[in-house]
Every structure is written in structure tokens, then in C-alpha cells.
Image (cartoon, helix red, strand yellow):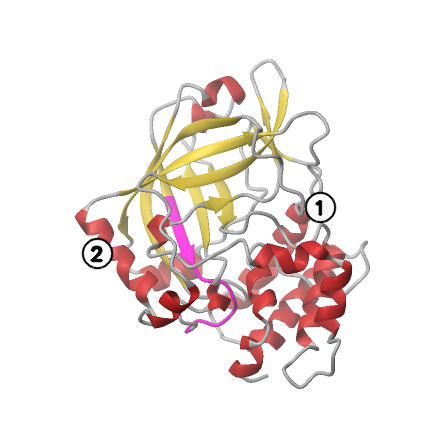
Amino acid sequence: MSHRSRAHLAVTASVVALFLGSPARADEPALIAEQTVDTLNTLFGKHPGFRANHAKGVVAEGSFTPSPESAKLSKASVFAGPAVPVTVRFSDATGLPTIPDGSVQANPHGMALKFKLADGSEMDVVVNALKFFPVATGEEFRDLLIAAARSGPDAPHPTPLETFAKSHPAAAAAGGTAKSPTSFARQTYNGVNAFVFVDKDGKRQPFRYRFMPVQGEEILSEDEAKARAPNYLTEEIGPRLAKGPAEFRVLAQLAQDGDPTSDATKPWPDDRRTVDLGTLTVTRLVPDSASAEKALLFMPNALTDGIEVSDDPLIDARVQAYAVSFGRRTQ
């Protein structure tokens, strides 16, 4: 498939940010993951050494300082002590390592984090700029990718992608919630999957992450983004950090009774309580970002005592597919 054909699939590029998916039975998650990566390779080509999705990125370092409020919600050690080191990878969507940063297809941009905890263990968080996910299950996401792969510019209408979108309203709407920022440091990143806090008394509280730039979000129009240099985001972040750190407020939106935790297509109402968990401070790029990102694997279920997965089926689906992608790029 040509780059022009792939550009026609703007919806696909927007939705492949969190998860990789493709066809198989629901009781075969490992096979689904294998076919997922195969489908992404069909859409974006094979690029040895790179991720099947979010292939273009840059790695930075920083720290997380918890707020006093966070320890009331969770017994996790990341909220109990002093600041901990964090490795951060900012990225563009798609499996194209040379995609222009300002392309519509580069949305949603992603941020993956690895917290280095005091006991030597690690905790991962994977978020991006979508406000909600386009589908609720791995099977649906599989169907979406297949439909996209069959819906090039010469496909008759209604294309398979158009047919899928008609029966899955969130699929078309999700991609429109992510826009191009002026900097990786000036975008809000959301956790569309629900996780669960557990406090010292065993009380459980479902939540979703939100990372908000302290300087505020700064978004470009589509035309403005296209006019920027192809690597404007990946080249801007290093000099920015050299002048001073980029800070994000780490927030948790708390679910109320009845709010769905197993359906990532359904954002919770804006009036739900939001708690400040602390501050992420990004201070510098790593010395060799290209080597560092090849070795990094961020897994949404790599948690710590006091934070658990919810009943959202997409979490395991992402884990399975990320593992396949990692295995292939490190061969």
C-alpha cells in the first residue's frame, strides 16, 4: 500500500495509538496479537527495529513528585515517598518512522512512562491525546483495522471502513478528539482505560489518568501543523528541555457508581471528581534516544501494589500486542 493510500486512512492512524488489533477468535489472545501486528504492517509497512505502531518517538528523563492527596487514594509506594525517576517516551501515531510530525495521521501523539520505584521495581503508564477510544473490545478493534486495510482510495463506496464507522459511532468520533500541538510538552494526554486504586484499608476506586501540561495546552490548526517542518516535535523537545523542565499535572478522574469501566468508548462526565496525584517533571532527553527506545517496553499491566487493572478488556489486548511488537523489533 502506498503512502498516499495510507494517508487516506486518517481514522485508522488516529485510532491505532493505544492498541494493536487484528482477526482471530476471542479465546485466542496470543493469535489476535500476532495478527494485529501483521495488519499494522500491512497498513504501514515493515520497518525492522521499529514499533508496529508509534514507530517515531523520542525518549526523555525526569521525575514524579506525588501530592499528599494521592496517598489517601492508593497505598502504592509511588505516592508514599519522595520523588521517583521516570523515563518518558513521546511519540507520533502510525507505524511510519518518518511520518511528518504535523500530519493528521501522526495524531494522536502518545506518552509512555516508566516509573522507577524505590524497591527497584517499575510501574508503567501509557496515555495519549485521544479523549476516548474508538471501540470497546479487541474483536471490534480487529474489525476496524481490517476494514481500514480494505478501504484504500480506490475502494467502492460505502467502503468497509465507512460501513464499520456507521455501526460504531465512536470509531469516527474518537480520532477527532486529538489535535497537533506546538510541542510534546504542550499537549494533554489521557488514559482512556480505567484502572483501580486500592487504599490501605482495601477500598477500591476506579479512575482514569490525565496528564495536563502546566504551561497549558497549545494546539495548532490542521493547516498550521502541516506547514511545520517534518520533525518539528521531535526536534523541538530537546532544546526546550535544555532551557528548563516541562511539567505536567498528573490527575486521576474518579468514577462514580454506574460509570462504565469496561468500555473505553465512553468517557465519564466532566463533573466527576478529579484528584491531583502529583507532578511529572521532564528534564532532558536521554543521550541516545534511538537506542533507548528500541530497548524500552511499556506494558499497561506493569503496575504496583495499590493500583490494579479494571475489567476493561482492552488492557490485556494491548499487553498481548505490545509484547509481539517488541519481540519482532528486537530480533
Q: Amino acid at mark 2?
A: Pro
**Do we see residue 331 in this rendering?**
no
Q: Earlier in the sequence, mark 2 or mark 1?
A: 2
60 up-or-down from 312: above or below:
below
Q: Answer whether labels 2 and 1 touch (C-beta < 8 Å).
A: no
Q: Is residue 92 magenta?
A: yes
| Direction top: furthest residue | 201
**Residue 307 location (% of width, % of height):** 57, 30
**Do we see residue 284 in this rendering?**
yes
Secondary structure found at label 1: helix
Front residue of 61 and 236: 236
Front residue of 170 and 86: 170
Neighbourhood count class around disc 2 (C-alpha, 10 Å): few under 14, some 14–19, many 20 upward:
few
Secondary structure found at label 2: helix
| Residue designated by label 2 | 239
100 with respect to 201 (left or right):
left
| Residue designated by label 1 | 313
- Residue lying at 19% horizontally and 51% vertically, measured from the top left: 242
**Residue 23 location (% of width, % of height):** 75, 66
